Image (cartoon, grey):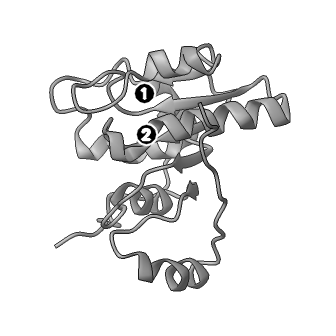
């Protein structure tokens, strides 16, 4: 059974979340709470953040990656950030206690620290982190993800969401 414990996942003070993460409260913080796996499309997310920075000239925006920067089954996120020239604007979860990360009780603070939760993941079956973030009062920017593609349009319309097409540039 999957779902969100609404007694636990509820809005928290943004300042408390920023203190937990060690992030300046004056920054506009996009964040992604996903595993560092290939299907999570961190490459696409970092590229999209680069486009956002170029289009808006935002100097106070950051992307917080709540996952290890390098894994054997995923991306080298530091290398990707350098590739796109955004290494100074991408923050990594340096203080996540190893090996299992923050206890679940701390995750509402993590979500509440974000001004907007974003993900470029492909092939999500349920999208639990998106629901947890929404339960904490956050804005969400997600791709059209599902393991059942036929469900996408009706679910998106029901939630008043819209699809933003984005693709990587050709090499």
On the image, the x and y values in percent for residue 43 come to 49, 34
Work out whether 156 lies above or below 8. below
Quarter of the figure with the C terminus: top right
Q: Determine which residue is flagged by label 1.
A: 20
Quarter of the figure with the N terminus: bottom left
Residue shown at 22%/39% (left/top)? Answer: 103
Q: Determine which residue is flagged by label 2.
A: 110
Work out whether 92 lies above or below 124. above
Residue shown at 43%/82% (left/top)? Answer: 150
**Foreground tag (2 vs 1):** 2
Whether residue 135 is visible to the viewer of this picture, yes or no, is yes
Q: Nearer the viewer, residue 97 or 162?
A: 162
Whether residue 29 is visible to the viewer of this picture, yes or no, is no
Label at residue 165:
none
Under circle 1, the secondary element is helix
Under circle 2, the secondary element is helix
Q: CA distance from mark 2 to mark 1?
A: 8 Å
Relative side of 63 to 21, left or right: right
Relative side of 6 to 167, left or right: left
């Amino acid at each position: 059974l999957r779902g969100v414990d609404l007694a636990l996942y509820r809005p928290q003070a943004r300042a408390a979340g920023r203190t937990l993460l060690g992030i300046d409260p004056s920054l506009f913080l996009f964040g992604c709470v996903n595993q560092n796996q290939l299907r999570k499309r961190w490459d696409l997310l970092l590229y999209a953040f680069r486009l956002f920075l170029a289009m808006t000239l935002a100097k106070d925006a950051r992307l917080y990656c709540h996952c290890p920067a390098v894994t054997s089954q995923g991306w080298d996120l530091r290398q990707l950030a350098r590739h796109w020239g955004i290494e100074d604007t991408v923050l990594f979860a340096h203080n996540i206690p190893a090996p299992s990360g923050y206890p679940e009780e701390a995750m509402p603070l993590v979500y509440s620290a974000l001004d907007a939760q974003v993900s470029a993941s492909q092939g999500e079956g349920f999208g639990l982190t998106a629901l947890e973030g929404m339960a904490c009062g956050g804005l969400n920017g997600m791709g059209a993800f599902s393991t059942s593609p036929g469900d996408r349009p009706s679910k998106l319309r029901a939630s008043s969401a819209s699809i933003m097409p984005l693709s990587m540039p050709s090499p």
